[in-house]
Amino acid sequence: EARAAIVDWQSEARGAVAQFERALVELRAGGGDISDGATSTAEGAPPPTPLPEGPLVLLTGATGFLGAFLLAELVRLRVAPHVVCLVRGADDVNARERLSAAMDSYGLWDAHVAACVVVLAADVAVGPSLGLRWRLLRTVGAHAILVVHAAAQVSSALPYTALRATNVGGTAHVAALALHAGARLLHISTLGFVDAGHAETLEVKTSSFACRSGYAQSK
């Protein structure tokens, strides 16, 4: 079994804090009106998705297994009238198609959920703007009352260095947005899963995970 690379964790921790601080400074400065990311604005691209008025919940990672059920529960509990989901995609339409397909695969997509969900093409790893135009990001931040961050790049094979941008940098960017917006932050970080046939328990030993997995190191 290949073991995870040795990492200077003190240096990594300092780097993550510095990344968070830079993101916060950039958010406070306003960032201009140009996206860091690759959200399409080409001729013929669908128009930007309008944001609803009023309070909203911002959710990342909604296309994942856990994220899909989080989204369904946020809609059911009506924490806010709308949930804005940041989903990777060529544009907002493509991102919404990806989300609806993921939700539908678990039997969670229906007319009520569709009406409560706004999907924006974004990527938490690209920078403090999360791949959104700054004007749109400021609008999202102004109305967000809760930020639920569940996005992560999951792999048992990739090293920490390949997962750092999304799992560490992306978390720093989302946390900075929540702090800047004055919204409550709920960060969901899973380390692993229980193997099939494992006895039900409230505790799973994780002491050896960090030396076995780049994914565990990134958490």
Image: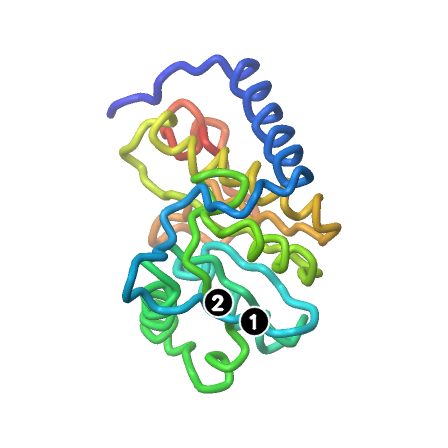
Residue at the far right in the pictured view: 182
Q: Are marks 1 and 2 in contact (CB under 8 Å)?
A: yes
Residue carrying label 1: 73
For residue 148, above or below residue 101: above
Specify the amino acid type for callout 1: Glu
Q: CA distance from mark 1 to mark 2?
A: 6 Å
Left/right of residue 87 with respect to residue 196 in the rendered view: right
Is 17 or 119 nearer to us in this picture?
119
Q: Residue 26 versus residue 219: which sits nearer the camera?
A: 26
**Label 2 crowd bin: few (<14), some (14–19), many (20+), radius 10 Å:** some
The residue positioned 54% from the left and 40% from the top of the image is 128
- Looking at the image, residue 52 sits to the left or right of residue 85; the answer is right
Q: Nearer the viewer, residue 138 or 99?
A: 138
Question: Which of the 4 image quarters holds residue 104?
Answer: bottom left
- Name the residue that disc number 2 marks: 69
Q: Nearer the viewer, residue 160 or 209?
A: 160
Which residue does the image show at 43% across and 39% down from the upper left? 126
Q: Quadrant of the N terminus?
A: top left
Q: Is residue 163 left or right of residue 136?
A: left
Question: Which amino acid type is marked by label 2?
Answer: Phe
Residue 212: give x, y in percent of width and height: 36, 26
Q: Position of residue 119 (x, y in %)?
A: 46, 66
Neighbor class of circle 1 (other Cα within 10 Å; few <14, some 14-19, many 20+) is some
Q: Residue 2: image x %, image y %?
A: 25, 23
User: Helix or strand or loop: what does disc 2 sit on?
Assistant: helix
Percent position of residue 154, x then y: 36, 43
Furthest-bottom residue in this view: 111
Instruction: Tell me the number on the disc at residue 33.
Output: none
**164 vs 171: above or below:** above
Residue drawn at (45%, 47%) of the image = 131
> Could you tell me which secondary element the residue under label 1 belongs to?
helix
In the depicted structure, whether residue 60 falls above or below residue 22:
below
